[in-house]
C-alpha cells in the first residue's frame, strides 16, 4: 500500500489585520453620492446654493460613512473614521478664507501688476497710471528700521528671562509687562510714537522713523515671547556639559544655546515682521502719506503699502474709481508677496544655520 506524500495546499487564512475593511474608494464615492443627493434634495425646495449643498452634503457624508464603517468594520473604526473626517473638514474650512483671500487679491490685482506700478509713484497722477514704488520703499525702510531696533531688544530680553532672571521678581515683572504689551491696540502704539516725536521735534511731526518706533513697540513682545520659548526648549544637559568644561555662561549662551535655537528664533522674528508689516492705523498717525518718493526716514511723511492701499480704496473719486481700486488691489498683492518672500527667506536662513545632525 503506497502512501501519498503530496502536500495539499492549506486553505488560505483570512488576515485579521486587513479583513472587514471598506474599499479604498469608499470615502470618495460616498462623498460624491452625498453631495449629489444633497444637491438634488435642496433643488426640490429651491435652496440649492453652493453653501447649502456643501453643508448638507458634508453632514450626509459623515452619517453615511459612519453607518457603512460601523456595519463593515465595527464601531471602533467607525468612530475613528468619523473623527478623522471631522478634523479634515474643519481644516479645509479654516483654509477657505485664506484661499478666498489669495484668489480675490490675485484676480483683482494682477491687472496693474506691471512695470509702471513698480517704477512710478503717485506724484501728479490723477486717474489711470502711476504706481507704488514710493510706498514699497517706505514699507521696506520703516519695517527694516523697526526690525533693527526690536530684534536686539527682544533677543536680549528673552536671554535675560531664561538664563538670568527666570526666578527673580524683575523677570516676573518683565513677563507681565510683555504680556500687557502683546495686547496693546496698534493705534495706541502709533499715538505713543506720535506724541513722543511731537514733544521732541514739535507738534505735528511726521516721519518714517516715528512709524518705525510705533512698529517696534508692536514687534518687541512677539520677539520676546517666541525667543523665550525657543530658548526654554534647549536641553539643560547642553548647558551643563558646557559648564563642566569650564566655559563661562555668556560664552555658553553664544556658542551653545543660541546656535541650537537659531531656527526657532529666526522663525519668531519673521512672524513678528509679518505681524507689523501690514499695520495701517499706527502708520497713518506717525508716517502719514505722501504721493512722492521719500527715502529719508528722519523727516517728512513717508508712504507705506498698507496706507497706500487704504488711500487708494477709500479716497477714490467717483469719476475713475476702477483705476484707484486696481492700484489698491495691486498694492495688497505686493504686500502679500513681500510677506511670502520674508517667510521663504527666514526658512532658508533657519535651515542654513540650524545645527546639523551628528554635530
Image (cartoon, rainbow, N blue to C red):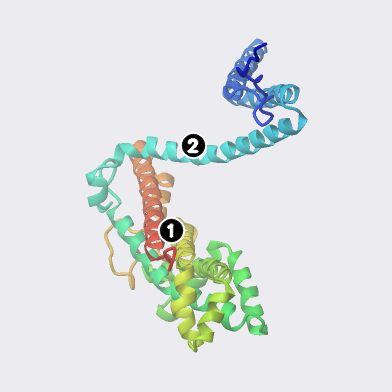
Indicate the quadrant containing the N terminus: top left, top right, bottom left or bottom right: top right
163 lies left or right of 316: right
Q: Position of residue 83 (x, y in %)?
A: 69, 36
Q: Quadrant of residue 318?
A: top left
The mark total stands at: 2
Residue drawn at 61 percent across, 78 percent down? 174
Q: Position of residue 8 (x, y in %)?
A: 63, 17
245 lies left or right of 23: left
Indicate the quadrant containing the C terminus: top left, top right, bottom left or bottom right: bottom left
Q: Position of residue 249 (x, y in %)?
A: 51, 86
Observer able to see residue 171: yes
Of residue 242 and residue 305, the one placed in the foreground of this image is 242
Q: Quadrant of residue 324?
A: top left
Of residue 157 and residue 181, the one placed in the foreground of this image is 157
**Which residue lies under the disc numbered 1?**
277
Of residue 245 and residue 220, the one placed in the foreground of this image is 245
Residue drawn at 67 percent across, 24 percent down? 14
Reply above or below: 107 against 347: above
Q: Secondary structure at mark 2?
A: helix
Q: Which mark is residue 100?
A: 2
Amino acid at each position: 500500500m503506497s502512501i501519498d506524500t503530496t502536500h495539499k495546499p492549506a486553505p488560505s487564512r483570512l488576515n485579521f489585520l486587513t479583513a472587514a475593511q471598506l474599499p479604498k474608494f469608499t470615502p470618495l464615492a460616498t462623498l460624491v453620492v452625498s453631495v449629489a443627493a444633497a444637491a438634488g434634495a435642496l433643488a426640490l425646495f429651491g435652496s440649492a446654493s453652493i453653501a447649502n449643498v456643501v453643508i448638507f452634503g458634508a453632514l450626509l457624508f459623515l452619517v453615511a460613512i459612519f453607518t457603512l464603517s460601523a456595519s463593515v468594520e465595527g464601531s471602533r473604526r467607525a468612530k475613528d473614521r468619523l473623527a478623522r473626517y471631522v478634523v479634515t473638514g474643519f481644516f479645509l474650512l479654516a483654509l477657505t478664507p485664506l484661499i478666498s483671500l489669495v484668489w480675490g487679491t490675485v484676480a483683482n490685482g494682477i491687472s496693474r501688476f506691471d512695470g509702471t506700478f513698480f517704477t512710478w509713484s503717485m506724484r501728479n497722477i490723477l486717474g489711470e497710471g502711476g504706481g507704488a514704488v514710493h510706498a514699497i520703499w517706505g514699507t521696506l525702510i520703516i519695517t527694516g528700521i523697526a526690525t533693527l531696533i526690536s530684534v536686539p531688544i527682544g533677543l536680549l530680553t528673552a536671554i535675560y528671562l531664561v538664563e538670568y532672571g527666570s526666578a527673580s521678581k524683575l523677570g516676573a515683572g518683565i513677563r507681565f509687562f510683555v504680556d500687557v504689551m502683546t495686547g496693546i491696540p496698534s493705534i495706541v502704539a502709533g499715538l505713543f510714537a506720535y506724541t513722543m516725536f511731537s514733544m521732541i521735534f514739535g507738534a505735528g511731526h511726521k516721519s518714517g522713523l516715528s512709524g518705525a518706533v510705533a512698529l517696534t513697540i508692536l514687534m518687541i513682545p512677539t520677539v520676546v515671547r517666541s525667543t523665550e520659548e525657543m530658548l526654554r526648549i534647549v536641553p539643560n544637559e547642553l548647558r551643563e556639559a558646557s559648564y563642566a568644561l569650564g566655559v563661562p555662561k555668556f560664552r555658553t549662551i553664544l556658542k551653545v544655546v543660541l546656535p541650537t535655537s537659531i531656527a526657532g528664533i529666526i522663525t519668531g522674528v519673521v512672524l513678528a515682521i509679518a505681524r507689523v508689516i501690514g499695520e495701517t492705523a499706527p502708520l497713518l498717525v506717525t508716517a502719514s502719506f505722501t504721493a512722492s518718493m521719500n527715502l529719508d526716514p528722519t523727516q517728512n511723511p513717508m508712504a507705506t503699502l498698507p496706507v497706500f492701499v487704504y488711500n487708494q480704496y477709500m479716497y477714490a473719486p467717483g469719476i475713475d474709481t476702477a483705476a484707484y481700486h486696481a492700484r489698491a488691489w495691486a498694492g495688497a498683492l505686493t504686500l502679500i508677496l513681500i510677506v511670502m518672500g520674508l517667510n521663504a527667506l527666514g526658512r532658508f536662513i533657519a535651515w542654513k544655520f540650524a545645527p546639523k545632525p551628528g554635530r
